[in-house]
Image: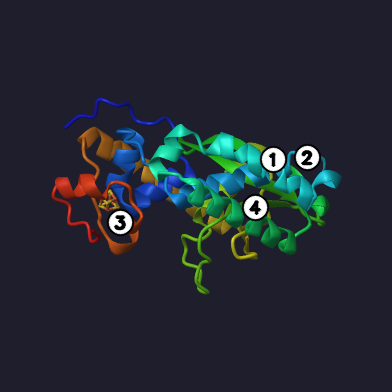
Amino acid sequence: MAFSQPLPKSLSPSRLADFQACPRRYQHASIERIPQPATYATAKGRFVHYVFENLFLLPADERTIERTREFVAPAIDTVLDEQVRSDLSLDEAMLEKMLGETHEIIDAYFAMEDPRAIASEGVELRLGVTVNDTRLFGILDRLDRDADGNLVIVDYKTGALPNRNFDSQTFANAELYALLCQAKLGETPSKIRLLYVSHGESVERNVTDVVIQARSNAATNAWKKIQRFYDDGDFPATPSTNSCRFCAFKDICRKNGVPVPFR
Ligand code: SF4
């Protein structure tokens, strides 16, 4: 079956993760562009990102906890639009829960770092580069400059903490952002910081050229496969407990006879 929709022009870290988890998910999300309804978790993630993005658009000396809380009310209108409200069946109780959890996250964040002391190079940075004929594009939460003058990639996480052994996927997206920084800005970040703001904890990893090269190779190889599957008109489904658990396309897959392991 040939696709009537065009192949996307670029590959983002999150779409690469989709493809690596299950090529069929990439097909549904990126080729067929089947809408993925918002969930409480995705809406809360966008809500919290909105607050922290606006915090770092303030001059450094104004980044207080009081100013941060001022961005919560505007986030209601900006993030929780009609579609999201409908997807969530948002009612007063759910909104109160989200607002309460957001204020707890703000408290936890301010216990982790003082944003007035952060030298931010930018937030929501849109970086696009072509590496080995593969067009990569990503939006970076935050790029800092540390006390030694090195770039640091910062990614906010509102989900669960990774386990102690951090699997290779924990830093995968951020390592691809490091490749984007290297290729676009001509400077390699020295470190990645993942801020698990719901838990007030961060995990860090140094960036090495070996890792960047490995991520570059993985993205290039994935893009070649994507082009091949697109030409074939079929992206194989690779159902598994991990990949299917939070996938929005379970019902479609079941209708197509894919043995999805969740009800
Ligand atoms: S439900 Fe499972 S098999 Fe189907 S697209 Fe999602 S991850 Fe792939």
**Residue topped by disc 2:** 58
In the image, residue 63 above or below residue 108: above
Which of the labelled discs sits on residue 115, or is there none?
none
Type of residue at label 4? Val
Q: Secondary structure at mark 1?
A: helix
**Residue topped by disc 3:** 244
Q: Residues within 10 Å of mark 3 (few under 14, many from 20)?
A: some
232 sits left or right of 177 in the view: left
Residue 14: image x %, image y %? 46, 46
Type of residue at label 3? Cys
Residue 20 appears in the picture as rendered: yes
- Measure the alpha-carbon separation of dots 4 and 2: 17 Å
Which residue lies at the image location 77% right of the left edge and 54% below the top edge? 146
Q: Nearer the viewer, residue 23 or 240?
A: 240
167 sits left or right of 66 in the view: left
- Measure the alpha-carbon separation of dots 2 and 1: 7 Å
Which residue lies at the image location 41% right of the left edge and 50% below the top edge? 17
Give whichever of discs 1 and 4 has the lower sequence position.
Answer: 1
| Marks 2 and 3 in Cβ contact (< 8 Å) | no
Give whichever of discs 2 and 3 has the lower sequence position.
Answer: 2
Type of residue at label 1? Asn
Is the residue marked 3 within 8 Å of ligand 1, measured from its CB?
A: yes
Give whichever of discs 1 and 3 has the lower sequence position.
Answer: 1
Residue 249: image x %, image y %? 28, 46
**Residue topped by disc 4:** 154
**Residue topped by disc 1:** 54
> From this viewpoint, which residue is outermost toward the right?
61
